[in-house]
């Protein structure tokens, strides 16, 4: 399937959806503290998104039951909200998707609950710094696999490893479109499609500590590393313009 090239009016619509994503993430972040449940955070996000006449796009997507993904401690991505209270020292990844007028937005962050250890903060910093390092590296004409190499190298040079089997993605009229953007290189980095002006896609480094091999928990959604250790995840939706890359989900 071809990678879509978006016109300026389409990019404007995508920017609107992603702006709601950014606001929703900030809203949820303001409520993250010890004693709060992820179900409560889910309801906050759902109400907030709908107040903008938008729709939480994760709810029902592939039969996912909730409006946000809430991934606590060793759950790296796709955590399902529940009634377990967050504790001081936990870390939580929050991933939000929005559909507005048929256009989609998507972004995520990982943050500490109250005061966290230096070890956990470094894990969070790796995913965040890798995301922005990758965004800064994007140029028209580079291959998506070269972007994957930047992501992989950025994670590994900080002493961590990328989660295997999951990836960033294109976004537009559907929440997940071509291309798939791995956080590691499969095959040769100088092969495959090139990044072009007008492309809109999500970059989302997913960081593990010692093993990138993944497994699903019993809920059939929550993704963890086989090492059982905490992970982290950040994501932004970006658009490639004439002379720059712009983050839409900010």
Image: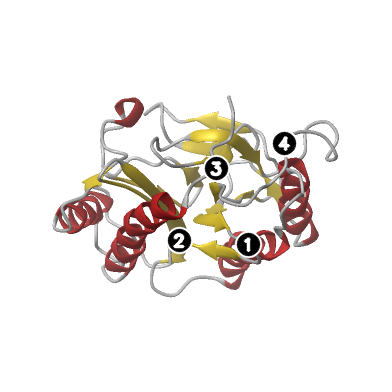
**Label 2 packing within 10 angstroms: few (<14), some (14-19), many (20+):** many
In this orientation, which residue lies closer to the viewer: 76 or 218? 76
Q: Secondary structure at mark 1?
A: loop
- The Cα atoms of the two marked residues, 1 and 3, are separated by 13 Å
Q: Using the rendered image of the protein, determine whether residue 187 is visible from the camera's viewpoint.
A: yes
Q: Position of residue 53 (x, y in %)?
A: 15, 52
- Which mark is first along the chain, 3 or 4? 3
Which label number is shown at residue 248? 2
- The Cα atoms of the two marked residues, 4 and 3, are separated by 13 Å
Residue depicted at x 39% and y 73%: 114
- The Cα atoms of the two marked residues, 1 and 4, are separated by 18 Å
In this orientation, which residue lies closer to the viewer: 130 or 120? 130
- The Cα atoms of the two marked residues, 4 and 2, are separated by 22 Å
Which label number is shown at residue 242? 1
In this orientation, which residue lies closer to the viewer: 19 or 233? 19
Q: Give residue 140's quadrant in the image.
A: bottom right
Query: On the image, numbered disc 3 is attached to which residue?
Result: 5
Residues at circles 1 and 4 in contact by the CB criterion of under 8 Å: no
Q: Using the rendered image of the protein, determine whether residue 94 is visible from the camera's viewpoint.
A: no
Q: Position of residue 97 (x, y in %)?
A: 35, 47
Query: On the image, numbered disc 4 is attached to which residue?
Result: 193
Q: Secondary structure at mark 3?
A: loop
């Amino acid at each position: 399937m071809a990678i879509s090239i978006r016109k300026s009016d389409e990019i404007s619509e995508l920017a609107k959806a992603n702006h709601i994503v950014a606001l929703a993430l900030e809203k949820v972040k303001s409520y993250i503290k010890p004693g709060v449940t992820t179900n409560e955070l889910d309801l906050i996000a759902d109400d907030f998104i709908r107040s903008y006449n938008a729709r939480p796009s994760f709810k029902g997507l592939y039969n996912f039951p909730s409006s946000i993904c809430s991934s606590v401690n060793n759950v790296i991505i796709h955590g399902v909200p529940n009634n377990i209270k967050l504790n001081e020292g936990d870390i939580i990844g929050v991933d939000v998707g929005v559909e507005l007028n048929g256009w989609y937005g998507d972004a995520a962050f990982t943050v500490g609950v109250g005061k966290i250890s230096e070890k956990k903060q470094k894990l969070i910093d790796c995913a965040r710094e890798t995301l922005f390092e990758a965004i800064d590296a994007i140029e028209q004409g580079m291959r998506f696999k070269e972007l994957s190499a930047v992501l992989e190298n950025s994670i590994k040079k900080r002493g961590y490893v990328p989660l295997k089997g999951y990836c960033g993605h294109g976004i537009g009229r559907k929440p997940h479109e071509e291309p798939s953007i791995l956080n590691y290189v499969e095959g040769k980095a100088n092969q495959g499609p090139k990044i072009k002006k007008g492309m809109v896609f999500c970059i989302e480094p997913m960081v593990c500590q010692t093993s990138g091999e993944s497994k699903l928990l019993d809920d059939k959604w929550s993704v963890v590393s086989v090492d059982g250790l905490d992970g982290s995840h950040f994501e932004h939706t970006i658009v490639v313009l004439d002379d720059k890359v712009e983050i839409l989900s900010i």
